[in-house]
Image (cartoon, helix red, strand yellow):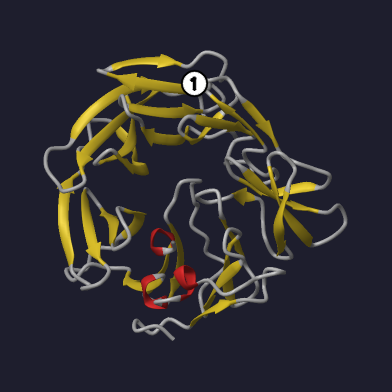
Amino acid sequence: MTASGVAVAVAMGLCPGAAAHAGAAEPLEKVVHEVPRRLPGGGQVRPRLMLDATRLLLSAGKSLYVRHLRSGKTVKLADVPLPKGTTLFPAGFTVGNGRIAWWTARTARGGKKRTADFWAVPVGGGTVRRVASAVLPPPSRAGLVTGLAVTPKGLAWSAGDGGVFVAAGGAVKRVEGTRGRHLLSWPWAGSPGPFDPRQTPYQSVKNVETGQTRRAPGPGSAVACGVTRCIVRADGSFSARVLGRDGRAQGAVDATVMPPQPLLRDRFAVAYPPGHALVHDVTTKTAVVVEGVDTGTRYRTAPGDDLVVFRRGDKYVIVNLAAVK
């Protein structure tokens, strides 16, 4: 039980060959936290991302807030601009190079085309600036903006099956040879994309700067893939191996109740047994067990996410991956 009252454990036998790892196991209260689902004034919040190991970004209506996990204090960071005609509200939050970025979408009155606006604000607060705008592809199973990253020169994102786009100095261009690929972790993009629940995303990845490609290792069916490795389930079995993209074995994991997903930060995967959740760390061969959460309500995660979010009554339960060494 953590100081916040969340029932958790660090399991050592859930990943075959697991061993104790102090960075993941202590102190446990740095890994799992309860966060109120509403602000003191009553507004409902949504956890977005970890700014670092101790600060959580929240959104509520037209505003962004920072929750300090150690003190429990929540402070306002910035107001979110919503241009006229906005139909899709802030999404795709990411952080890098001292900036928080996200996107919104708008439709002109009577029009059919959607335009995405990409925004950024300093991590410490300040003026929100529109970095770029781009016309989105028509709605499809592939999704709209399927990935967003802060790059050394500006922003990069993937849209529908249209490929990867970069923006620097306000100019937007598609990266050649990326159609059908979705941003995984700059500069890597992959396929399939993240929004088709029938397929494991990012089984094939490509470095959009160098052209290097990597495929999911086999034999078997990939369950979760990152930049350098995948969890691969043997055909007709729930046992799974962790394999490098080069095919080298890196361990094993129980994938019995593990749906297709990205391998978060290239090392974390989530399983959903009834009544609790398991967050597997394939690097340390341990798993954080979170008890008493609503596993029927799942919040979509992106490959670079530093948190996993569950719901428990009137609170969120946050697994803070940024605090795992």
Task: Report which quarter residue 254 is drawn in.
Answer: bottom right
What residue does disc 1 label? 209
Mark 1 crowd level (few <14, some 14–19, many ≥20, 10 Å Cα): few
State how many labels appear: 1
| Horizontal arrangement in the rendering, residue 315 relative to residue 277 (left or right) | left
Give the vertical position of 109 relative to 256 (above or below).
Answer: above
* Quadrant showing the N terminus: bottom left
Give the vertical position of 306 relative to 317 (above or below).
Answer: above
Farthest residue, direction left: 126
Closer to us: 324 or 199: 324
- Taking the spot 54% from the left edge, 30% from the top edge, the residue there is 189
Tell me if I can see residue 162 in this picture.
yes
- Taking the spot 32% from the left edge, 71% from the top edge, the residue there is 35
Tell me if I can see residue 316 in this picture.
no
**Which amino acid type corresponds to the residue marked 1 in the rendered image?**
Glu
Give the vertical position of 212 relative to 308 (above or below).
Answer: above
* Quadrant showing the C terminus: bottom left
Give the vertical position of 22 relative to 6 (above or below).
Answer: above
Task: Report which quarter residue 250 is drawn in.
Answer: bottom right
- Taking the spot 25% from the left edge, 26% from the top edge, the residue there is 131
Location of residue 262 in the rendering, given as x and y in whole percent from the top left corner: 58, 47
Location of residue 318 in the rendering, given as x and y in whole percent from the top left corner: 41, 67
